[in-house]
Image (cartoon, rainbow, N blue to C red):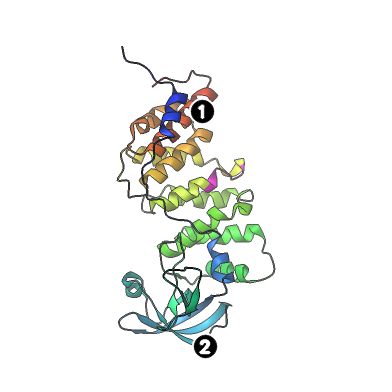
């Protein structure tokens, strides 16, 4: 006879199992704060005057947001993709530094003998080259100023910028919203609709969609009405087996956790395949979410 394993026991077993996933290290604080308050950083809106092979650009300062930014700066861009995308005559918001870290002692800084370079912030996975829009100017100005902006204005700027197609700036504002937990309770339905647009867009990287689902579970009830349908769309497009070096397990886990709060009994059938996922965290999330949904629906929890 096959022995059935109760859900609670399976959760305990899975708690002892771990496999590597592609969960990127997140910034320790909201990225706008990190960019504008780190004393080693300088931030400006600037126009690209000239691209200098193989990996430098000359910029003309327009607005300084952090540090004593010179009127003209030549910066190194250390990744080829970013350098290739920079356009002469175009304005960007850029964070850069004249300092670098000691290879052995990361907290030890010294002036970089090769000159200033565009920085990369942990958790964003990209160089700090962002779209110059009214929204990004407002966000960087607000982050660098002493006056506290109205949370509604910050949310409006974050969500308007979020739906724009620039992936670097999208990454910036999504991570900012995730880590600005003080903003989550103030999200209004029109702003939540923009978040829903990004979550439901398969062209957006999975990690960012997962981050938004994690943030959305803390939105006010009136701003969560889209969440059930978005979760249904996302889970229907996912397969339970993942390449574990991708962010697929992270997205699946986030959507299953959200379904625990917003799913209905009819959603369980779509969640069941994830009980056999090759990612243990996804299996745990599926078990827990199915149990919560069935209990809420007044049905018995299944044995597996």
**How busy is the neighbourhood of tag 2: few (under 14 within 10 Å), some, or many (20 plus)?**
few
Residue 103 image offset from top left, x and y in percent: 41, 70
Residue 75 image offset from top left, x and y in percent: 42, 81
Q: Quadrant of residue 15?
A: top left
For marks 1 and 2 on the same chain, the one whose residue lies earlier in the sequence? 2
**Residue visible at 38% across and 29% down?**
272
Q: How many marks?
A: 2
**How busy is the neighbourhood of tag 1: few (under 14 within 10 Å), some, or many (20 plus)?**
many
Which residue carries the number 2 mark? 71
**Residue visible at 60% across and 67% down?**
143
Residue 41 image offset from top left, x and y in percent: 53, 75
Q: Quadrant of residue 2?
A: top left
**Residue visible at 56% across and 71% down?**
38
- Per the rendering, the mark at residue 292 is 1
Q: Nearer the viewer, residue 92 or 160?
A: 92
Q: Nearer the viewer, residue 101 or 265?
A: 101
SS of the residue at dot 2? loop
**Residue visible at 54% across and 69% down?**
35
Q: Nearer the viewer, residue 279 or 165?
A: 279
Task: Using the image, determine if residue 74 lies above or below residue 200.
Answer: below
- Is-magenta flag for residue 218? yes
Work out whether residue 35 can be spotted: yes
- Is-magenta flag for residue 252? no
Residue 10 image offset from top left, x and y in percent: 42, 27
Q: Main secondary structure of the magenta part?
A: loop
Work out whether residue 267 can be spotted: no
- Range shown magenta: 215-220
Judge left or right: residue 86 versus residue 37: left
Judge left or right: residue 54 versus residue 169: left
């Amino acid at each position: 006879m096959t022995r059935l394993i109760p859900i609670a026991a399976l959760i305990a077993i899975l708690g002892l199992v771990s496999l590597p996933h592609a969960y990127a290290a997140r910034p320790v604080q909201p990225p706008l704060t990190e960019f504008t308050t780190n004393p080693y950083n300088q931030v400006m809106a600037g126009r690209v005057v000239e691209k200098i092979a193989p990996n430098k650009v000359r910029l003309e300062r327009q607005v300084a947001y952090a540090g004593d930014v010179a009127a003209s700066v030549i910066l190194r861009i250390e990744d080829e993709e970013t350098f290739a995308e920079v356009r002469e005559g175009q304005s960007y918001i850029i964070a850069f530094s004249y300092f670098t870290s000691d290879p052995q002692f990361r907290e030890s800084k010294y002036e970089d003998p090769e000159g200033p370079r565009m920085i990369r912030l942990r958790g964003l996975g990209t160089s700090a080259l962002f779209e110059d829009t009214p929204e990004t100017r407002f966000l960087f100005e607000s982050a660098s100023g002493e006056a506290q902006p109205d949370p509604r204005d910050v949310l409006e700027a974050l969500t308007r910028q979020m739906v724009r197609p620039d992936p670097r700036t999208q990454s910036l504002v999504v991570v900012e919203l995730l880590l600005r937990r003080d903003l989550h309770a103030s999200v209004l339905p029109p702003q939540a609709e923009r978040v829903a647009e990004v979550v439901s867009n398969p062209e957006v990287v999975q990690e960012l969609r997962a981050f938004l689902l994690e943030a959305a579970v803390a939105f006010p009830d009136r701003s969560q009405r889209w969440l059930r349908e978005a979760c249904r769309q996302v889970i229907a497009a996912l397969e339970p087996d993942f390449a574990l070096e991708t962010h697929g397990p992270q997205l699946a886990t986030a959507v299953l956790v959200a379904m625990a709060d917003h799913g209905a009994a009819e959603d369980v059938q779509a969640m069941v395949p994830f009980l056999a996922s090759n990612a243990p965290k996804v299996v745990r999330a599926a078990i827990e979410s199915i149990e919560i949904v069935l209990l809420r629906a007044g049905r018995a929890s299944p044995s597996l």
